[in-house]
Image: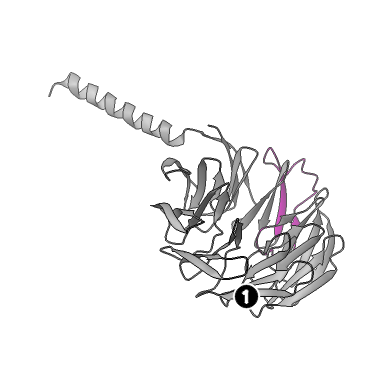
């Protein structure tokens, strides 16, 4: 083979590599990142013009839209040595966090100063704000409703085992899963029990509401469909345990598991539209945004088409992602080595 032909082939190969790289990152652009004081598990809550970062060891940081803690209005992060349990909930003027010292705390969004704390029987899980109340489970086997204004406990309901995830709060009910593998449905107004359904493994994933019932991931390796009355209607079998809530956007439902499998589910009949294996555990709920699905899997972010599950781009991350959020055309993720990053998404 002539020298000229070798040079031509080498140039063609380089052009192909560059083209593949461009295609793999098309529609994504790095804007900013923020380095936290230390590594660890952290969670993200988006607001109209801010991002809250909850760290497991006990630090709540407010970042501006420019990914900075300067100009956020907070003199310093809100900290507590008991540590925070999961994602913060955001109300009209306050953020709410569950803490390891058997308390839920309300933090003023403008100043970062604590407004109140409410004491319960054991470590409090991640809360949900709905109307004028804050709902959360705890390690004492109870579900609580507290007034968002002053933290007064309005009702508590025994569910018999630890409640590890945030509840699903609907117009009239509160759904929680427990480590005993039981899904409980309670009246939102007074905590009275409506029904309970036993599954074949612990429930660490928050339930999701669909048109004709609820979808619940479980450590038994299935996504379960429950009726409004708690009847088990159908299941989709996965390959690993399901601890991340399913992602829902319009009529698109996707679920991921610890084996790195992600699939789109047709919720009416609980069949699989497509199924893909990615490169790491899916421990964070996938995000569905119109015709795209975003997923954090191990040390990668993956963007796929919602219709076929075709990979559009992949992006390596510094460390395994601990949370993923989407707001205002930006994709945010936190990594276990203490970084929060943001991408601007274009189409």
Within 10 Å of disc 1 (Cα), the crowding (few <14, some 14-19, many 20+) is: some
- Would residue 271 be found to the left or right of residue 17 on screen? right
Residue 93, percent across and down?
A: 82, 51
Instruction: Compare residues 103 and 246 and report the one nearer the observer.
Output: 246
Q: Residue furthest bottom?
A: 160
> On the rendered image, what quadrant is the N terminus found in?
top left
Q: Which residue is mark 1?
A: 196
Q: Residue furthest left?
A: 1
Q: How many numbered discs?
A: 1
Residue 93 appearing in the image = yes
Residue 9, percent across and down?
A: 23, 25
Q: Which residues are magenta?
A: 59-87
Residue 136, percent across and down?
A: 71, 67
- Would residue 196 be found to the left or right of residue 143 on screen? left
- Quarter of the image for residue 104 reads bottom right
Q: Residue at x 52, y 67 (%)?
A: 233
- Residue 83 part of the magenta segment: yes
Please identify the dominant SS of the magenta region: loop
Residue 278 appearing in the image = no
Q: Residue at x 64, y 69 (%)?
A: 176
Helix, strand or loop for disc 1: strand
Q: Residue furthest right?
A: 150
137 in relation to 9, above or below: below
Residue 323, percent across and down?
A: 58, 53
Q: How is the image coloured?
A: one colour
- Quarter of the image for residue 105 reads bottom right
- Residue 159 part of the magenta segment: no
- Would residue 251 be found to the left or right of residue 307 on screen? right
Q: Residue at x 53, y 70 (%)?
A: 232
Instruction: Compare residues 131 and 92 and report the one nearer the observer.
Output: 131
């Amino acid at each position: 083979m002539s020298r000229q032909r070798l040079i031509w082939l080498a140039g063609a190969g380089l052009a192909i590599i560059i083209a593949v790289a461009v295609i793999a990152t098309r529609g994504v652009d790095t804007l900013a990142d923020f380095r936290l004081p230390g590594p660890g598990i952290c969670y993200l809550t988006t607001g109209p013009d801010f991002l809250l970062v909850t760290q497991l060891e006990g630090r709540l940081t407010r970042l501006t839209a420019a990914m900075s803690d300067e100009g956020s209005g907070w003199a310093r992060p809100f900290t507590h040595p008991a540590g925070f349990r999961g994602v913060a909930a955001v109300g009209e003027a306050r953020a709410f966090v569950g803490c390891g010292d058997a308390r839920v705390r309300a933090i003023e969004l403008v100043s970062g100063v604590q407004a109140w704390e409410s004491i319960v029987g054991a470590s409090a899980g991640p809360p949900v704000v709905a109307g004028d109340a804050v709902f959360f489970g705890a390690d004492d086997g109870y579900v609580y409703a507290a007034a968002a204004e002053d933290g007064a406990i309005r009702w508590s309901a025994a569910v018999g085992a630890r409640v590890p995830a945030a509840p699903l709060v609907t117009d009239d009910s509160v759904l929680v899963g427990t480590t005993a593998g039981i899904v409980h449905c309670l009246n939102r107004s007074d905590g009275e029990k409506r029904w309970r359904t036993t599954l074949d493994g612990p429930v660490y994933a928050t339930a999701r509401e669909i048109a004709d019932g609820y979808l619940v991931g479980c450590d038994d390796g299935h996504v379960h469909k429950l009726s409004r009355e708690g009847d088990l209607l159908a299941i989709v079998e996965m390959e690993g345990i399901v601890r991340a809530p399913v992602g829902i956007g319009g009529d698109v439902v996707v679920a991921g598991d610890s084996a790195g499998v992600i699939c789109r589910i047709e919720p009416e009949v609980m069949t699989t539209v497509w199924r893909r294996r990615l490169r790491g555990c899916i421990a964070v709920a996938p995000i569905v945004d119109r015709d795209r699905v975003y997923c954090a899997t191990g040390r990668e972010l993956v963007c796929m088409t919602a219709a076929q599950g075709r990979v559009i781009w992949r992006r390596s991350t510094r460390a395994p992602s601990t949370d993923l959020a989407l707001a205002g055309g930006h994709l945010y993720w936190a990594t276990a080595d203490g970084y929060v990053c943001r991408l601007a998404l274009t189409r």
